[in-house]
Image: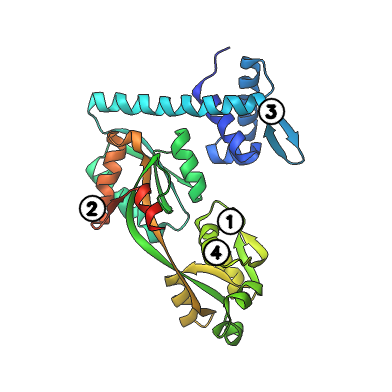
């Protein structure tokens, strides 16, 4: 039995998520289909690739070795398709774009609208992913382009910085007196609403802010959507990190108190595999983004690491 690319992609997703349901959701397929794909790969290779531990699926030693090869094969398949598009010289096809859930801030709707005007034969498949999930999707071929909050530290990717996003720490309006004069230690000790996924940019920002000072925030509630976090703050549950515009709006409405101590900036970027820079679909998206973000600039992972 031959293994097709869809089955191989499911194997990689299950290995990365360590969970069948999460992998199925990520790939937009049913759980039964994901299970069938994994079973087909195991049967074709006559090898057990996963063992169940508690609620997770972990790779066997054979699975670990095959995962590396599977990633290479998927990457080569992506490059093969991109090369074929270059030969045709046509900008058409399906473009998979990964993005965070805050689409208003990255103006993705405007970018895709511009893309459709410039290249009406390109259809877009939009998928919500945290930053780490977007990077994984770019490398596995699930995604063609990502729009994400991320410091450009991955040498396999090309980053175009669109802008920098400012963040503030906010808490319930009733906590204003406690927050106004609070030190870093005091802020960290208060109840927090934090990301459930360490791959979210919000987690990286909190680590840079508090972890660098040897502090761990007192997380009492976790979230996988920033809208939920803001609702928890407004309900009096704890502190969280929000974009500056949400902090200003919440303070003006009397729903939030903003810490005067903590401020952070993080780059908002477009990213794609460096090996796909000549792919007509990728070039079309970058062209459209440049119309919406005229100050967009290429930033390298090397320069980012030196700056950090």
What's the coloring here? rainbow
**Disc 3 marks which residue?**
60
**Disc 1 marks which residue?**
224
Q: CA distance from mark 4 to mark 2?
A: 38 Å
Q: Quadrant of residue 78?
A: top left
Q: CA distance from mark 2 to mark 1?
A: 31 Å
The structure residue drawn at horizontal position 58% and vertical position 80%, both measured from the top left corner, is: 183
**Disc 2 marks which residue?**
291
| Label located before the other in sequence (4 or 3) | 3
Of the two numbered discs 4 and 3 in the rendering, the one whose residue sits closer to the viewer: 4
Query: Quick one: SS at disc 2?
Result: helix
Is residue 114 visible to the viewer in this orientation of the structure?
no
Marks 2 & 3, CB-CB < 8 Å contact: no
Marks 3 & 1, CB-CB < 8 Å contact: no
Provide residue 256's location: percent of width, then percent of height: 54, 78
Of the two numbered discs 4 and 2 in the rendering, the one whose residue sits closer to the viewer: 4
Query: Quick one: SS at disc 4?
Result: helix
Q: Quadrant of residue 81?
A: top left
């Amino acid at each position: 039995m031959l293994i097709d690319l869809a089955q191989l992609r499911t194997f990689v997703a299950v290995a990365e998520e360590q969970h069948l349901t999460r992998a199925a959701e990520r790939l937009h397929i049913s759980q039964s289909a994901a299970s069938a794909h994994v079973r087909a790969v195991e049967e074709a290779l006559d090898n057990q690739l996963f063992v169940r531990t508690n609620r997770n699926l972990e790779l066997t030693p054979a699975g670990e070795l095959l995962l590396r090869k599977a990633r290479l094969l998927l990457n080569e398949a992506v490059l093969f398709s991109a090369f074929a598009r270059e030969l045709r010289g046509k900008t058409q096809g399906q473009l998979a774009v990964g993005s965070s859930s805050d689409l208003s801030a990255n103006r993705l709707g405007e970018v895709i609208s511009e893309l459709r005007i410039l290249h009406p034969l390109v259809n877009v498949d939009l998928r919500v992913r945290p930053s780490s999930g977007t990077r994984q999707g770019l490398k596995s071929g699930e995604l063609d382009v990502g729009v994400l909050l991320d410091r450009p530290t991955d040498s396999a990717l090309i980053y175009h910085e669109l802008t920098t996003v400012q963040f503030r720490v906010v808490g319930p309006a009733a906590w204003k007196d406690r927050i106004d004069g609070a030190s870093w230690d005091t802020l960290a000790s208060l109840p927090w609403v934090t990301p459930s996924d360490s791959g979210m940019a919000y987690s990286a920002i909190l680590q840079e802010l508090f972890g660098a000072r040897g502090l761990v925030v007192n997380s009492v509630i976790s979230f996988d959507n920033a809208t939920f976090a803001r609702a928890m703050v407004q309900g009096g549950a704890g502190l969280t990190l929000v974009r500056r515009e949400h902090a200003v709006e919440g303070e003006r409405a009397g729903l939030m108190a903003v810490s005067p101590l903590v401020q952070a900036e993080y780059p908002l970027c477009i990213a794609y595999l460096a090996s796909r820079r000549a792919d007509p679909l990728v070039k079309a998206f970058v062209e459209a983004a440049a119309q919406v973000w005229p100050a967009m600039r290429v930033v390298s992972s090397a320069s980012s690491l030196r700056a950090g």
